[in-house]
Amino acid sequence: MQILSIMAMIVLTIAFIVMILTNFLSKKNIEDREKVSPFECGFDPISSSRLPFSSRFFLIAIIFLIFDVEIAFILPMTIILPNSNMFIWMYTSMMFLLILTIGLYHEWNQGSLEWAS
């Protein structure tokens, strides 16, 4: 047990030293206006180089990721069916799908799934 704690301390020390070294070596020394401004063929930019971000798109993307992860949870349920108790499997599956359906209904009812208002 003592050897394990010594090895953990050595690994943490090496990781800390590497983090400090990369912090010092990666710093930019000179930051002037020309280096930090966007480059457009040698001319000063006409408008802002940052485009406004659509919060609707971000919301739809987050909802997609949530439901995508939930699909990844549903797929293995069919694989474990032969090795599990049928009642417990059915109860767990139905509760999971019920929570998914309630979440989908809530998002739909709030209007989060509509792209254009």
Image (cartoon, helix red, strand yellow):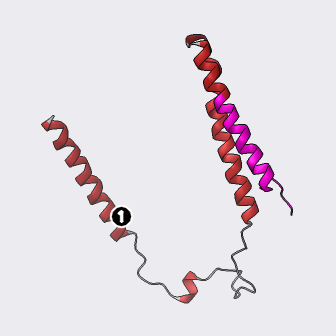
Specify the farthest residue to the right: 117
Mark 1 — residue? 22
Towards the viewer: 5 or 86? 86
Answer with the quarter of the image where residue 40 lies: bottom right
Q: Residue at x 80, y 56 (%)?
A: 111
**Dot 1 alpha-carbon crowd within 10 angstroms: few under 14, some 14 to 19, many 20 or more:** few
Q: Quadrant of the N terminus?
A: top left
**Which SS type dominates the magenta stretch?**
helix
Asked if residue 80 can be seen in this view, the reply is: no
Is 21 contained in the magenta span?
no
Towards the viewer: 17 or 74? 74
Range drawn in magenta: 95-117
| Residue 26 x, y percent position in the rendering | 40, 69
Q: Indicate the secondary structure of the residue bearing disc 1.
A: helix
Tell me which amino acid carries mark 1: Thr
The relative height of residue 103 versus residue 33 in the rendered view (above or below) is above
Is 97 contained in the magenta span?
yes
| Residue 24 x, y percent position in the rendering | 33, 70
